[in-house]
Amino acid sequence: MTQQTTLARYYAPSEILNIYKGKLTTDYYTCRQGQLRIYMQGIFILGKGQVYQGYCFDFLKDASSNSYLNIKIPLALHSQLQSGSLVNVAGILEYNVQNAYSSIQLILGVTWAETVQTNVVSEEDAKRNELLLIKNKSKGKNVDTILESILYEDRRPVIGLIIAETAITETDFNRGLNAAAKEKVQFVRMRCSFARALDLINMLKQQDLKGYDAIALVRGGGGEKDWGALDNLDVLKTIVQMKTPVISAVGHPDEAAFIKKLVDKEVDVPFALGSYFSNMVNDIIEQRAKSKAALVNEVKKQYEQELTQARKQNAALTEQMKALTKAQEEGQKLHDQQLRKANEQNAELQKSIGKINGSITELTKKNSEYALQVANSSSRIEELENQLKSRPNWFIVILFSALSAAIAIYIFTQTHIIL
């Protein structure tokens, strides 16, 4: 839309960003349920082009400075605006804590927008906005996640510090560091002039090849006219092209250097950078302690479960052992009974065998006696036969033969009766 609507006084992003410094008075806004209804004017700059829950996330830039404000705008309004145009917008000002290190982000939820003038940015601003667009579309480097993961593994991240050539800058940074951060993080310090663009470009390119986990630009405040190389397009282009994550710790919170929009992590001042590392190290130490305690509790819980299970198994095995012992005792008892009965039967059998052996001995003795008698009788009969032969008497021979036969039959009959 190109119509001009008169609603209220319009404020620039830089004015809104000063809200926490007390530069806005109550006539700047009306309060609605704790949020701020704001009317603003600025240059519309495209963000990453991503749509989330019907909103696009873009920027509103000062027409006369490098201050930017994050805005979220409904897709329908977004399609009516052109990047680089001067626009009027109205919406609810929101703020939230961006991460665990108390970085507050302001964002305007746009509910109305109109175009005032198209193509109002200078050629130099257009090039800066192109760099911002490239940065937003690239795969970002989450410095917090990178450093936290290294520290959580109990390794030392290596940070390259490019420090401005002023003594107070490094002093302010060191004041923000605690003993834990000095021990857990390795800082490689180097000095560089932030006033000469070529020096800074060469420094950035050299350090980008050294495999740091992050590179931080450290410089105090000085105002927009004193940014020197930090506002140089070639320096900004170099930062966008770097593979190493870049942290900005330049200027003061109210100094809107464009470089802050292109880096991967922004902190306000050198002291805040030292505090950033100190807070991160403290948080990781605490998380590791909690994680260790949780692991101990988990192991203890698992051990107790295994101990309970072992006790149940031991109780079951004890019952099985009792049952087996009882069965063994009953088996032993039955075995003893059977053995005792077998011994008794064996004793009876031995006794019977003894009687049988006695009978056999007696029979053997009698058989011997009968055999002797038979032998004697046979001898006697032979004598008688001889006598008869010498004195033939057929009657006597017949008589003795019959007598011999009768004696033999008697002896044979008696022997078999005994057996």
Image (spheres, rainbow, N blue to C red):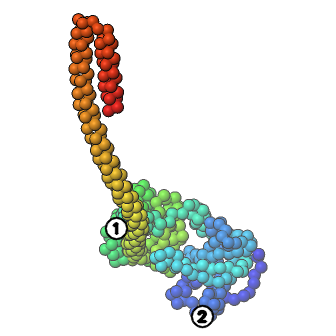
**Towards the viewer: 104 or 411:** 411
59 horizontally vs 388: left or right? right
**Towards the viewer: 62 or 30:** 30
Residue 327 placed where, x, y %? 39, 58
- Find disc 1 in the rendering and name its residue: 184
Give the quarter of the figure containing the C terminus.
top left
- Name the secondary structure under disc 2: helix
Residue 313 placed where, x, y %? 41, 63
4 horizontally vs 301: left or right? right
Residue at 25% from the left image edge and 30% from the top image edge:
366
Nearest-to-viewer mark from 1 and 2 = 1
**Towards the viewer: 382 or 390:** 390
Q: Judge the density around disc 1: few (<14), some (14-19), many (≥20) Cα neighbours within 10 Å.
A: some
Q: Is residue 384 above or below residue 338?
A: above
Residue at 40% from the left image edge and 56% from the top image edge:
210
397 horizontally vs 71: left or right? left
Query: Is residue 204 at all visible to an observer of this figure?
Result: yes
Which quarter of the picture shows residue 325? bottom left
- Find disc 2 in the rendering and name its residue: 26
Which quarter of the picture shows residue 376? top left
Kindly report the distance in space between the C-alpha atoms of the residues bearing marks 1 and 2: 46 Å
Give the quarter of the figure containing the N terminus.
bottom right
Residue type, numbered disc 1: Lys
Query: Is residue 121 at all visible to an observer of this figure?
Result: no
Residue at 25% from the left image edge and 34% from the top image edge:
362
Residue 47 is labelled as none
